Amino acid sequence: MRYKRQEVDDSFQNPEYFNFSRHYFDYHDDIPRSKVYQIIRMMPKGAALHVHSSLMLSADRLLKLTYEEHLYACFASDGLKLRFSQAVPPRPCPSKWKLLSKLRNHTKNVDAFDEKLKRHFTLFSKNKKHLKKDINHTWARFNKICRTISDLITYRPVREKVFYEGLKEFYKDNIMYIEIRSGLPNLYELNGTVHDLMFMPRLYDRVTKKFKQEHPDFVGVKLIVTKRRYNNITDIQKVLEVARGIKRELPDFFAGFDLVGQEDLGKTLLDFLPVLKSADGDLNYYFHGGETNWFGTSTDENLFDAILLGTKRIGHGYALLKHPKLMAVVRAKNIAIEVNVISNNVLSLITDVRNHPLAAYLAYGMPVVLSSDDPGAWGADPLSHDFYIAFVGIASKRADLRLLKQLIINSINYSALDYDSKTKMYSTWTEMWDIFIQKVIQDFR
Ligand SMILES: O=c1[nH]cnc2c1ncn2[C@@H]1O[C@H](CO)[C@@H](O)[C@H]1O
């Protein structure tokens, strides 16, 4: 049984639906019709502090970029491979590299072709079959998507557009400031030139400055350098050196370092302790920690090491609720938990959003910020969908605008901005908030 459209906001709370699991995918198409959502969309949202830059942009926009010239495609059993090239790419392809423009021209139904292509850019699917599979299966699908998108956007001209367009989508969602996580790939040009690792942060910094010039009320972007946690300790050591280099060259743009990828299957912080510890204070950490629904595993125990290593915030912190002593430490040390509800739902940690520990974190008054992780891959707005699900599906029914306001203030407070920038951002945001409230009163009375 499905709820009626107009009941979408209430349906989370309606006892009639208590027996039905509330997966984000069930609500996805109805969310934009909700009045609460429309208000949240208009709301000035402060900062998005947990976002992977390669998955910021919507699948629709990515699809448009596949219309760029010189794009070759290879449909392989382990996913779609893409490469911009003047001639057939020298990379191996189990089938055959083909120009995407030619494939598209030869198809009878371009819309159907594009719709199918888009499925390689998003985990969102109305087909629930895969929801019955386990976390590792979901992650395997997700990793495929990450690889295909990464292929598309490692081409320098496309990456510039992706980032600019991504900023635009965030700005339109009324976000003023973003902390992006990026693994710094080596970008390439059509003539085969491959850029060094410093090229990406410089490009991001330059595009941000241009965007800021064109949107003076946008506060900016900072970078958290990442490396996948299946790498070995030497790789981590190398990227920490690169991170130090970025910090020296772009001190205002650089925020810190993090490890990414499926935490359950990857290496632990403890595995990298010798190199992470030697960084002693010269780099700020923003570690993922406890992105698991297991208990007593190396993944939830990563939380101990993240905190001992002085992490400024904790990415996800899903398993923190099972560690009351750590909860107390997190509160005492004022370490924000970066909650990404939709991500946890889509990546199979929970099948029903109401079971998210965010409810308890809010009830206990824990320092929480809401973010969206990979909104492009979820078919979600940059922050609005996450705010909507958190507000309507997880927070107390008695919660009101004050909760939303507090979460936004937290996002400013726990950002990597310096004190003066936070103060300035807060005062601009307050003005925007007042205008927003007036508009809500006018439009939704
Ligand atoms: O929820 C998450 N936890 C850990 N890593 C993630 C998550 N979402 C995305 N990434 C990682 O960010 C990179 C983007 O290309 C990928 O390495 C992906 O695994």
Image (cartoon, rainbow, N blue to C red):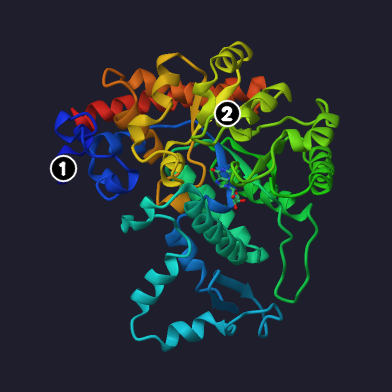
Q: Residue furthest bottom?
A: 106
Q: Quadrant of residue 405?
A: top left
Q: Nearer the viewer, residue 271 or 207?
A: 271
**Left or right of 322, for residue 297:** right
Decide which of 247, 5 is in the foreground and name it: 5
* Residue 25 rendering spot, x and y as whole percentages: 32, 48
Q: Which mark is residue 296?
A: 2
Residue depth check, mark 1 versus mark 2: number of the one nearer the observer: 2
Q: Is residue 311 visible?
A: no
Residue at 55 percent across and 16 percent down: it is 327
Residue highlighted by disc 1:
3
- Rendering coords of residue 115 (x, y %): 37, 69
Q: Nearer the viewer, residue 303 or 332?
A: 303
Image point (59%, 17%), residue name: 326
Q: Which mark is residue 143?
A: none
- For the residue with label 1, is its CB less than 8 Å from the closest atom of ligand 1? no
In the displayed structure image, the side of residue 192 where residue 85 appears, left or right: left
How crowded pointer 2 is (Cα within 10 Å; few <14, some 14-19, many 20+) is rated as few
Report the residue at 65% width, 21% height from top: 420
Residue positioned 27% across, 29% down in the render: 440
Whole-number angstrom distance, CA of label 1 to CA of label 2: 38 Å
Q: Is residue 165 left or right of residue 17?
A: right
What amino acid is at disc 2? Gly
Between residue 40 and residue 350, name the one nearer to us: 350
Query: Which one is earlier in the sequence, the residue at label 1 or at label 2?
Result: 1
Residue 282: tell me if it is visible. yes
Residue 207 picture location, percent across and down: 64, 51
Q: How crowded is the residue under tag 1: few (<14 C-alpha within 10 Å), some, or many (20+)?
A: some
Q: Position of residue 290 (x, y in %)?
A: 57, 32
Q: Secondary structure at mark 1?
A: loop
